[in-house]
Image (tube, rainbow, N blue to C red):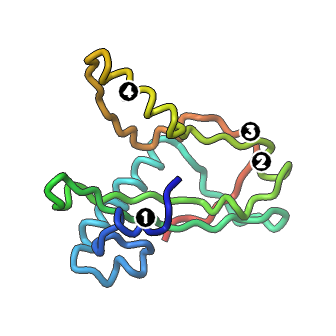
Amino acid sequence: MVTPTALQSINTPQDAITLKQAKQLPDFPQYYEAMKTEYKQLNELDTWEVVDRPTHRKVLSGRWVLRTKQGADGKVEKYKARYCARGFEQVYLLDYNETFATVIKDSSWRSLFALAARFGWEVHQMDFVTAFLNGEVEEEIYVEQPE
């Protein structure tokens, strides 16, 4: 379990929680480039279709989540941007009928690393950009366009 104190130690002063905060930072151009990259990927993957705002359905709001990825030396390696729909605004059986998150449990990765250490296996880390977009959604979901 990650505690709020642990999260504070992970997040650095360079991390911008909101777009408004990021606009105040001297490295906003790097965040802006990350946002453009994310937006381009979302469009290339046909994540959405722009339509007129429906009157009969709730439209979910969204927000940019901006972070920095740091190297072992503490210097910023990468600026990351994700556009996130506020899923907590969804209504069960209208906007969704099941939930699923591909998150590994702590006990699973600890077991994996213990086995790797015991048998001398090499472990690699991979970061899949927009990997979650490969799932098919059957329900119609309306989300505001990114700022």
Q: Nearer the viewer, mark 2 or mark 3?
A: 2
Extreme left residue here? 73
Q: Residues within 10 Å of mark 4 (few under 14, many from 20)?
A: few
Marks 3 and 1 close (CB-CB < 8 Å): no
Q: CA distance from mark 2 to mark 4?
A: 38 Å
- For mark 4, what is the residue? 114
Which numbered tag is attached to residue 138?
A: 3
Q: Are marks 2 and 4 in contact (CB under 8 Å)?
A: no
Q: Nearer the viewer, mark 2 or mark 4?
A: 4
Residue 62 image offset from top left, x and y in percent: 58, 66
The mark that comes first in sequence, 3 or 4, is 4
Mark pair 2, 3: CA separation? 8 Å
The residue depicted at 28 percent of the width and 56 percent of the height is 69
Nearer the observer: mark 1 or 2; the answer is 1
Q: Nearer the viewer, mark 4 or mark 1?
A: 4
In front of the other: 5 or 51: 5
Q: CA distance from mark 3 to mark 4?
A: 39 Å
Q: Secondary structure at mark 1?
A: helix
Marker disc for residue 7: 1
Q: Earlier in the sequence, mark 4 or mark 1?
A: 1
Amino acid under disc 1: Leu
Residue at the spot of label 2: 96
Residue 134 lies, with reference to residue 115, above or below; the image says below
Among the 4 quarters of the image, the one containing residue 10 = bottom left
Q: Amino acid at mark 2?
A: Tyr
Image-based side of 107 in relation to 85, left or right: left
Q: Residue at x 39, y 69 (%)?
A: 8
Mark 3 crowd level (few <14, some 14–19, many ≥20, 10 Å Cα): few
Name the side, left or right, on which 134 lies relative to 69.
right
Mark-to-mark CA distance, 1 and 2: 30 Å
> Which residue is more in the foreground, 142 or 23?
23
